[in-house]
Image (spheres, rainbow, N blue to C red):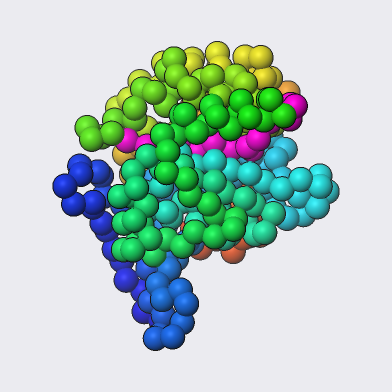
């Protein structure tokens, strides 16, 4: 079937555009349209999945099916912000049945646009909730704590949310429900939070906020990478993981090695190893 590149806005609401590559099937096929999850169009999206998965592998999370079999645990990822659905679809489809992805999106209009015009197809392992992201995260963490699930809920929380002005809402990191959720066990004991910022944003305030929120949960390395083309930086704060990641050089080497293994195992069509450690800085 043919591929069609699409971008979409939600009429009357000032959202940034999202871009996906959509596959259109012959009549009678269901679904009729679906996005090609491996064909992430925006450069930052390739960097986002590369660094998140490589970092999870480095700190010991069960990224690939073999690791999941050894640990007896699946991989759970929370994406705050849907956009066109490319990044959460990549996680769910490329990693396989041991990976469960939850997406929380503030605007129903975005979900409708993603499903109707961008080829996004939710499913049992790719669920979407329409709710404010920080409030959802806090509710999930508090429910887990009330039920005695001390091991945490998600291996990774991936935040890709912007307001009308093109800024990441401060509620995603400062004095917010997100911080409370992280402190109360939103992440598993070995996990990470990753957030996509524009290149000019000072990363010290969010880096400090995440470290403080995870201070009682085994907070470890925080770092950032730059996307190809230099338009964005992705801040990553980890908890748990090996104690011998003592320098940027050591971390970069392990990220590249992990990314190579993930690319081979998932048959990913783009270079993950370069993106996983490009312009790496420790915070």
Q: Which residues are the magenta region?
A: 148-162
Q: Position of residue 181 (x, y in %)?
A: 56, 24
Q: Position of residue 233 (x, y in %)?
A: 40, 34
Q: Is residue 218 left or right of residue 41?
A: right
Q: Residue furthest left?
A: 12
Q: Residue at x 72, y 29 (%)?
A: 147
Quadrant where the N terminus sits is bottom left
Residue 208 to residue 43: above or below: above
Residue 272 to residue 55: above or below: below
Q: Residue at x 69, y 25 (%)?
A: 146
Question: How would you classify the magenta stretch by its main secondary structure?
Answer: loop
Q: Residue at x 47, y 29 (%)?
A: 135
Residue 157 lies in the magenta stretch: yes
Residue 108 lies in the magenta stretch: no
Q: Position of residue 202 (x, y in %)?
A: 35, 20
- The answer to which of 205 and 182 lies nearer the viewer is 182
- The answer to which of 162 and 126 lies nearer the viewer is 126
Q: Residue at x 75, y 27 (%)?
A: 148
Q: Position of residue 126 (x, y in %)?
A: 54, 54
Q: Is residue 268 left or right of residue 190?
A: left
Residue 270 to residue 187: above or below: below
Residue 164, quarter of the rendered image: top left
Residue 167 to residue 97: above or below: above
Q: Is residue 248 left or right of residue 108?
A: right
């Amino acid at each position: 079937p043919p591929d069609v590149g699409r971008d979409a806005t939600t009429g009357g609401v000032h959202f940034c555009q999202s871009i996906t590559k959509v596959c259109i099937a012959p009549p009678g096929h269901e679904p009729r349209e679906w996005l090609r999850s491996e064909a992430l169009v925006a450069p930052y999206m390739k960097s986002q999945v590369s660094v998140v998965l490589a970092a999870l592998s480095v700190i010991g999370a069960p990224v690939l099916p073999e690791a999941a079999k050894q640990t007896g645990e699946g991989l759970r990822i929370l994406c705050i912000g849907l956009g066109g659905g490319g990044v959460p679809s990549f996680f769910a489809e490329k990693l396989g049945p041991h990976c469960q992805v939850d997406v929380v999106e503030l605007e129903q209009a975005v979900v409708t646009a993603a499903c109707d015009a961008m080829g996004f197809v939710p499913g049992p392992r790719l669920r979407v909730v329409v709710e404010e992201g920080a409030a959802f995260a806090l509710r999930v963490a508090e429910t887990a704590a009330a039920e005695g699930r001390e091991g945490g809920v998600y291996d990774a929380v991936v935040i890709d949310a912007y307001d009308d002005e093109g800024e990441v809402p401060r509620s995603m990191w400062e004095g917010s429900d997100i911080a409370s959720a992280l402190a109360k066990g939103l992440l598993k004991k070995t996990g990470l939070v990753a957030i996509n910022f524009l290149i000019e944003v000072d990363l010290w305030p969010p880096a400090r906020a995440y470290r403080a929120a995870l201070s009682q949960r085994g907070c470890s390395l925080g770092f950032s990478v730059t996307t190809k083309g230099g338009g964005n930086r992705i801040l990553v704060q980890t908890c748990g993981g090996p104690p011998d990641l003592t320098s940027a050089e050591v971390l970069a080497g392990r990220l590249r090695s992990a990314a190579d293994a993930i690319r081979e195992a998932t048959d990913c069509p783009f270079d993950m190893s370069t993106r996983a450690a490009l312009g790496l800085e420790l915070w």
